Image: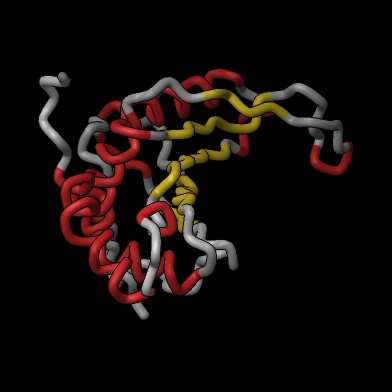
Amino acid sequence: MSTKTPLRFQELYKNEVAPELKKKFNYKNVFQIPKIDKIVVNMGVKQGAVDKATVEAAADELGIITGQRPVITRAKKSIAGFKLRQGQPLGCKVTLRGRMMYEFFERLIGIAVPRVRDFRGLPGKSFDGQGNYTFGLTEQIVFPELEIDKVKQVRGMDITINTTAKNNEEAKEMLKLMGVPFAN
């Protein structure tokens, strides 16, 4: 028996979102109901090929934001036009599942996204056709975990929410019920 308290979004999904989706899309089985499978947070660093310390700083910041140690991504092959060599660090990424995913999702939707400057909602057309939603943030400083004085460079990040939905309509409806503020 776990002593951890259930997360707000996890309870919201189980008690309100799942029954609503089952009723709306006439699912016969509870396993057909779409859910969030994982969240991938990716931070590309342009100067990573030149300065390894920049990538390390980005990885540290991403680790503070997500609560999980990121993997440093490297170039798969050399590209002379970009002065890029195979194996050079290019950025970092984190894949969140389970409890860490729901904790990050709560902070993302409840705190970070509303702190974006001139925020009018997330784009509603950023689905990939298979129920996965991707959007970008231009500044990592919207997360309150980071101390703004210690951030040396403002970087953006891409956030992908992978769902088990079969199409975009089901995924968008699920995310809308979970509280994602779509613009359109």
72 or 88, which lies in front?
Answer: 72
> Relative to 53, does residue 116 appear above or below in the rendering?
below
Number of marks in the image?
0
Q: Is the N terminus in the top left, top right, bottom left or bottom right quadrant? A: top left
> Relative to 74, does residue 14 appear above or below in the rendering?
below
Residue at the right extreme of this rendering: 80
The residue drawn where x is 54% and y is 30% is 92
Classify residue 61 as left or right of residue 40.
left
The residue drawn where x is 42% and y is 36% is 153
Q: Is the C terminus in the top left, top right, bottom left or bottom right quadrant? A: bottom left
The residue drawn where x is 43% and y is 20% is 69
Residue at the bottom extreme of this rendering: 184
106 or 52, which lies in front?
Answer: 106
Q: Quadrant of residue 152?
A: top left
The x, y position of residue 129, in whole percent, is 59, 67
The residue drawn where x is 84% and y is 32% is 77
The x, y position of residue 135, in whole percent, is 46, 58
